[in-house]
Amino acid sequence: MRKQTIDETRRCPKCGQAENQINAGYNRSGTRRCLCKICNYKYTLGGKTRAYPEETKQQAMKIYYSGVSGRGVGKLMGIGKNTLYDWIKKNG
């Protein structure tokens, strides 16, 4: 009989239990998914962030306010123009 080890990194974000967490495959980006056998909640271990660095946001807005169009800033910095417009709305 195998002894079950409890991995503290595998803690269910819904119910908070660290035991009865099993592997449940991978998501599209290749990150490990887990399943809590207590509450049947699937979650991702160490999910990836999609946020841009604050320096990039400030630089993009600075270029935009200097007279370059949103589309031009997007092409120049490799971001979407709608993302830039969202940053401008949020920061006033």
Image: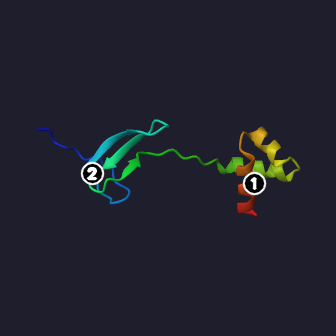
Report which residue position mark 1 lands on: 85
- Distance between mark 1 and mark 2 Cα atoms: 43 Å
- Tell me the amino acid under the disc marked 1: Tyr
Quarter of the image where the N terminus is located: top left
Q: How many marks?
A: 2
Q: Position of residue 14 (x, y in %)?
A: 37, 59
Nearer to us: label 1 or label 2: 2
Left or right of 85? Residue 54 is left
Left or right of 48? Residue 12 is left
Q: Which residue ends up furthest to the top in the rendered image?
A: 30
Q: Position of residue 50 (x, y in %)?
A: 58, 46
Report which residue position mark 2 lands on: 37
Quarter of the image where the C terminus is located: bottom right
Tag 2 secondary structure? loop
Disc on the earlier residue, 1 or 2: 2
Left or right of 43? Residue 73 is right
The residue carrying pointer 1 sits among few (fewer than 14), some (14 to 19) or many (20 or more) residues within 10 Å by Cα, namely some
Q: Quadrant of residue 23?
A: top left
Q: Quadrant of residue 76?
A: top right
**Residue placed at 66% from the left, 51% from the top?**
54
Q: Position of residue 83 (x, y in %)?
A: 70, 50
**Residue placed at 87% from the left, 51% from the top?**
66
Tag 1 secondary structure? helix
